[in-house]
Image (spheres, helix red, strand yellow):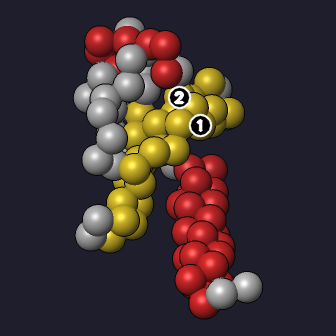
Amino acid sequence: MDSHAHISLASATRWQLQTNAALRSLEKDPDQCPLADEAADIGIDLRELHDGRGKHVFRAVFTIDGTTVNVHRVRHAAQDRLDADDI
């Protein structure tokens, strides 16, 4: 394995651990997260969680169904808004 592949694997592993921890935080109080900008356009209570720093911020969009949190997408925060077909 060359050094670039090793660095990429380490970065991916760190990102996965950080992302999983952020998503697990939704177990405690998912209502703390704001409605996503496109929630009104799509017609559902779509919420968003941002995590990360600098240019490495991801955005998780999710809905709450009783005590269940349904994560629909995890994307880079700079990506375009979602539409109904993306949910």
Q: Nearer the observer, disc 2 or disc 1? A: 1
Circle 2: residue type: Thr
Which numbered disc covers residue 87?
A: none
Task: Give SS at disc 2.
Answer: strand
Residue sitting at x 63%, y 79%: 5
Circle 1: residue type: Val
**Residue designated by label 2:** 63
**Residue 21 visible, this orientation:** no
Q: Residues within 10 Å of mark 1 (few under 14, many from 20)?
A: some
Residue sitting at x 53%, y 28%: 63
Would residue 41 appear left or right of 8 to someone viewing this image? left
Residue sitting at x 56%, y 83%: 4
Quadrant in the rendering for residue 37:
top left
Task: Give SS at disc 1.
Answer: strand
Q: Residue furthest front?
A: 2
Residue sitting nearer the eye, 21 or 27: 21
Residue sitting at x 36%, y 65%: 56
| Cα distance in 3D space between marks 2 and 1 | 7 Å
Residue sitting nearer the eye, 59 or 46: 59
Instruction: List x then y, in percent, for residue 29.
Output: 52, 48
Instruction: List x then y, in percent, for residue 40.
Output: 29, 15
Residue sitting nearer the eye, 43 or 79: 79
Would residue 72 appear left or right of 53 to someone viewing this image? right
Query: From the viewer's perspective, is residue 10 above or below residue 25?
Result: below
**Residue designated by label 1:** 71
Q: Residue furthest bottom?
A: 3
Sequence-wise, the earlier of marks 2 and 1 is 2
